[in-house]
Every structure is written in structure tokens, then in C-alpha cells.
Amino acid sequence: MDDIDRTIINHLQGGFPICERPFREAAAALGLEEDELIRRIDRLLQEGYLSRFGPMYHAEKLGGGLSLCAMAVPEERFDQVAERVNAFPEVAHNYARDHELNMWFVLATETPERIDQVLEEIETATGHKVYNMPKKEEFYVGLRFEL
Amino acid sequence: MIDALDRAIIQATQAGLPLVADPYAAVAEQVGSTPQEVMARMQRMVETGVIRRIGAVPNHYKLGFRGNGMSVWDVPDDKIGHYGRLIGALDFVSHAYHRPRHLPHWPYNLFAMVHGRDRDEVMEKVEKIAELLGDDDRGHEVLFSTRILKKSGFRLGGGQ
């Protein structure tokens, strides 16, 4: 990764144009050629420096349900329970964390009503209580990395 | 309101834009519409907030930001809006949310994801947040993730 890649990452985290030849427009703003920008973004994606390049959709505004949930799982059952939780397609992310509440997952459902339903199904499938922590207010979502 | 064409556009683009000179034309071909219609629909989604932004999503772990701590705070309910906005605007905080407590086990109502190059840097940043809160920090913890168990992300399903 070189300085040009860093410039691309620093400047293109948002605001990518919606127009004909958007890469040409974005490249010009960075002093690059269109095909070079496309190539570099492609490589940054291949090498894993970027997870994705494109529109970021807002789950709830799409009419879906989204919630953060946590469970306290005994160590000896942890992997087994993780497998059961992960088997639900509505579980979008699942992380182990350093706390008594040691399994944290995000539920993403087609409708808000499904959150409670899936949550109950997970409780039944795992035998553990799920603490539901939906967001009541969101303050700022948009990490801007400066490299 | 989003309709069938919007959903088709979402499904065609939620994993990324085609890396071609005319990406919106490529999407149009995929969904059976015109480039102008696709661009108009996406523009409207940006304006209504359905699309948060369009661009690069950095993989912070690969980029050297290995410390990612979920800091959780117990702050007075009547000040949570104020502190949420203040903390959410910090450049090392990517997301900040007001979430419900689950007393007595879980007294925290403000969550802020803190990023840094390593755990020590994250803890330094958390101290800065604690300083901002002063006496209104009635307790806090930082939960580091030890393993990623699943990371498939939110995806709109097919045939909806």
C-alpha cells in the first residue's frame, strides 16, 4: 500500500458520485486517471484493506429490524452455543467479548417484529437468556480513518 | 417507501458497486432498468438516508487499528442525548448509541465503539471520554472482542 492508496482510502470513504463515469470524476479530484483508480480500488479490495466499495444501506430505513444482543455463556459450552447462534441467518455478526456477557451478536431481520421472534428462537435453541439491546438513539455513525 | 425496483438495485449493489467505468449502467442492465432511472433511485435513497453514503469501507483491522473496544457507560438519562452527541463526534469513536439497561446486571446505557492501534491506545481514548463525562460517568467498562464468530453482515434476502 503506497501514498496514493492512502489518499484513496482517506478521501473516498463517502461522497462517491452518482453520475456517468463516477470513477473518472472521483479520480480527477485526486489527481489520478480513471483506470488507475479502478485498478487500485480493486487491488485494495483483493488484498483486504477495503471490505467493500459501494453504497452503505441503512437497515432500519429499509423497513428491517436491527438489534444488538448479548448472552452470558459458560466457557465449556461456548463453541457449541456459538454454532447454534450462527446457524440463524438473521445473525449478521457475532463476537466473543471479554466480559460475563461474552457473546454479542447483531440481529438483522426483514421486519422489526421478527427481532423478538428470532430472539426467542435463539433462547430456545441455546437454553440461555438473550439480553436485547436495541438502539434507542444513534449519535454518529461514520468512522473516518486517517492514514 | 422502496419498491421492487429499489429492492433490486439494493440487492445488486449491497455487496459493492461494479468496478467498471459505468457502474450504474452495469447495475441498470442487471436489474432491467435504465442508467438514468438507477441513478435517480440511488440519489433519492441518499437523500432519504436509505443509503448512508457511497464509498470505501476500510478494514480497520487490516489497516493496523487492532484495538477495537466497546466502551459502555452509565450516564444520567436526562443527559444521554448531550453526551451521546459529544462522544459520537470524537474522531476515534465510530458508533455511539443509547441502549437500554438491564438492571441489575447491566447498568450501562451509552455504548461507544472506540478504535485505536492497540488496546493501550483504546484505553487512552476511553480515558479521554471519562474526562469529558466527569462526575456523570457513574461507571464504565470496555469490552474487547476476543474472537470474530461470524461476520456476514446485513443482507437483504432474495425474492422479497
Image: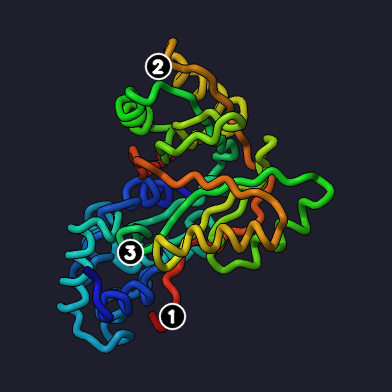
Q: Nearer the viewer, residue A122 or B43?
A: A122
Amino acid of disc 2: Leu
Q: Nearer the viewer, residue A115 or B24?
A: A115
The reply to whether callout 1 and callout 2 are in contact (CB within 8 Å) is no
Task: Describe residue A58's horizontal placement relative to residue B61 as left or right.
Answer: left
Q: Which residue bears the numbered disc 2? A: B132
Q: Which residue bears the numbered disc 3? A: A63
The residue positioned 33% from the left and 62% from the top of the image is: A55
Nearest to the eye among marks 3 and 1: give it: 3
Looking at the image, is A136 positioned above or below residue B90? below
Quadrant assignment for the C terminus of chain A: top left
Which chain is mark 1 on? Answer: B
Nearest to the eye among marks 3 and 2: give it: 3
Task: Describe residue A7's horizontal placement relative to residue A114 as left or right.
Answer: left
Give the percent coordinates (x, y) of residue B144.
62, 36
Q: Which residue bears the numbered disc 1? A: B158
**Mark 1 falls on what kind of element?**
loop
**Mark 3 falls on what kind of element?**
loop
Circle 3 residues within 10 Å: few <14, some 14–19, many ≥20: some
